[in-house]
Image: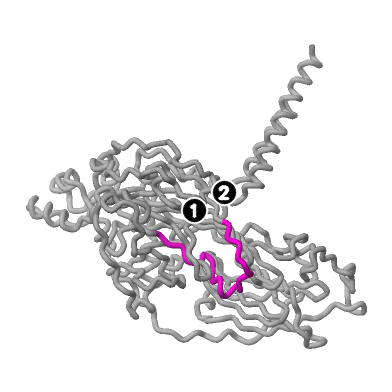
Amino acid sequence: MKKLFFALGIITFLSIISCGGGSSGSAGSEILPQNDETASQTIGDTPVAATGNSVTIPAVDENTYTSAVSENEITSDSTTSDKPDSSNESAAADENKTNNAKQDTTVPGNDDSGTGPDNKTTDNSSPDNNETGADKTETTVSENKNTESSANTESVIASDDQISADDDEEAADTASTAEENAFNFATGIELPVHIEFKDKATGKAIKGVEISVYDPENEKILANAFSDSKGISEFIIAGQYTGSRIEIVLKKDNYTPVRGYYIESNDIASISELVRTIELNPITSETGKGKDSGSIIADKDGDGIADDNDEFPADKSIAKVQKHSYILAFEDRYPGIGDADFNDAVIKYDINEFISSENTVPKIVIRSQVLAAGTNKSAIFAVNIAGKSYTLIENLKADIANGWNTRSNDKYLPGKVNEMVINFDKPVDRKAIGAIPYDPYLIANGAHHAKKGKIRSANEIHLSFVKTPYKKTRFAKNGLTYALLLPSDWVWPAEKVGGIFRAYPDFVKWYKSGGKSNTDWYRSYVSDRIFEQAVSTSSIAGYIMENKLMSTSILILLIIIFAGMIGLVRHYRLKRN
């Protein structure tokens, strides 16, 4: 019986492991197709390199952000050697951290869907004014204490808890033409595609060709698309990936599938648009193989996509859903200079884009969840899609009960999952929709302003690489961005640790190279400079958020297994008696 009990325990453990972390990129979890009888061929000509001006590297000096020091550290510096020991520095920083705030654990509002307004008033008081700076500047110590103290104090950037929601906002400048060539801090790829499909035997257009774009090294799908009634497919390959190449697979029933078309990652940036005309070989009764030869294809909804390839075989309006999962990290002192910790607003951002057989988008579902709000401000989170703005979260601070989730003593309390279902009156063309993640943005003081009450600021904080109707600058005066798009399991820097520069050392190498090196900088962090309370839960929370149905099924399976174990134990006990 012990062996049986042990075996059931192993099965349970493996079941738990199987529901592990969320995706570490933007694509869904579908694996690569197995090797079948597909043709491998070279498609079209060599990609033409795009012409463009060189990228302007940001002039930001990371030392400006990492030189914030407390008075205690300044005093101790005067008695140490010119090159202080880094371990002592870290210990001193930790000792100086205090947290007198008590987090309100009452979840505001009663609208669990997250689509309605939250009427709870936000407390905009500054709760943590006793918290001190974290990092010392690695500079030669002056013999004059007063001179050193003055120099260091002048270089300190105010911490988030010192910024009040009462402060008046600075008006943002209109974006300059110089920004067009600025390094845009994009963490993924964006490649427009235009493919026309023809029957090689007849020359006629082929509708319903399924295009799948893979990251073969990580077995992830980056994009899906279909050819329309004219045989044309237009879409954008967009997503975060750090592989050496992407693969495009083409599939249509009664035609020989095509795979083995690769684009090397080094070439992606040089291609302005992938334009191809592709002829597919029809499978006839004379040349066909096996059951596919001239077979009748089951298509219950009559949308031209075989039921085997149609994720919604009973719904003619949709055939595929493209899933993407990210974290958005914002700095909220726009358009001024912030502390670059990118924890003022940290939001889980999941997109389900539904695609029809005509390669249009009839519906989009977006789920958003506040993970951290390291600020006294009460922000609004919204997104622009196809010329219309949608408010996703009415009040970030209220969503996490006025908490922070950034300080060393904070108990991690992520917000509720907000869901926005966007049904278009008429399906929208993929090009009009734009590249995922669309245009998400933050209004930093939009939900509540202590002096002026509820307002909607004219200042918006957008990703610096997406297309947007917002005409004002998206960069700080030193070239730093205010928003980053990151993988769904990314963990944000803690308060007062020297910002993202100290928490993620490769970040500096990445932007100084113009994005050419250290493209996976967000994978390498310093453990005592991130919000560690979220590390053990971020991947699990991400998985549950992205796979509600699957996680429920696994939970039911685990309950059944445990119930079976208890039943077996009782059975053997009764048998012995």
Span colored in magenta: 421-442
State the image quarter where residue 171 is shown.
bottom left
| Residue 463 coordinates in the image, percent (x, y) | 42, 66
| Residue 22 coordinates in the image, percent (x, y) | 57, 51
Residue at left offset 29%, top offset 71%: 173
The stretch drawn in magenta includes residue 431: yes
Residue 305 circle label: none
Q: Is residue 488 left or right of residue 375?
A: right
- Residue under label 2: 545
Marks 1 and 2, how far apart at CA: 9 Å
| Residue 423 coordinates in the image, percent (x, y) | 61, 62
Secondary structure under the numbered disc 2 in the rendered image: helix
The quadrant of the image that shows the N terminus is top right
Answer few, some or many: residues within 10 Å of disc 1's Cα (few below 14, many 20 plus, some between 14 and 19).
many
The residue type indicated by label 2 comes to Met
The residue type indicated by label 1 comes to Lys
Q: Earlier in the sequence, mark 1 or mark 2?
A: 1
Q: Nearer the viewer, residue 562 or 146?
A: 562
Residue at left offset 65%, top offset 68%: 224
Q: Is residue 209 visible?
A: yes
- Residue under label 1: 348
Residue at left offset 37%, top offset 73%: 471
The quadrant of the image that shows the C terminus is top right
Secondary structure under the numbered disc 1 in the rendered image: strand
Q: Is residue 539 visible?
A: no
Cβ–Cβ under 8 Å for marks 1 and 2: yes
The stretch drawn in magenta includes residue 482: no
Q: Nearer the viewer, residue 281 or 372?
A: 372
In the displayed structure, 45 sits above or below 215; it is below
Answer few, some or many: residues within 10 Å of disc 2's Cα (few below 14, many 20 plus, some between 14 and 19).
many
Residue at the right extreme, as displayed: 286
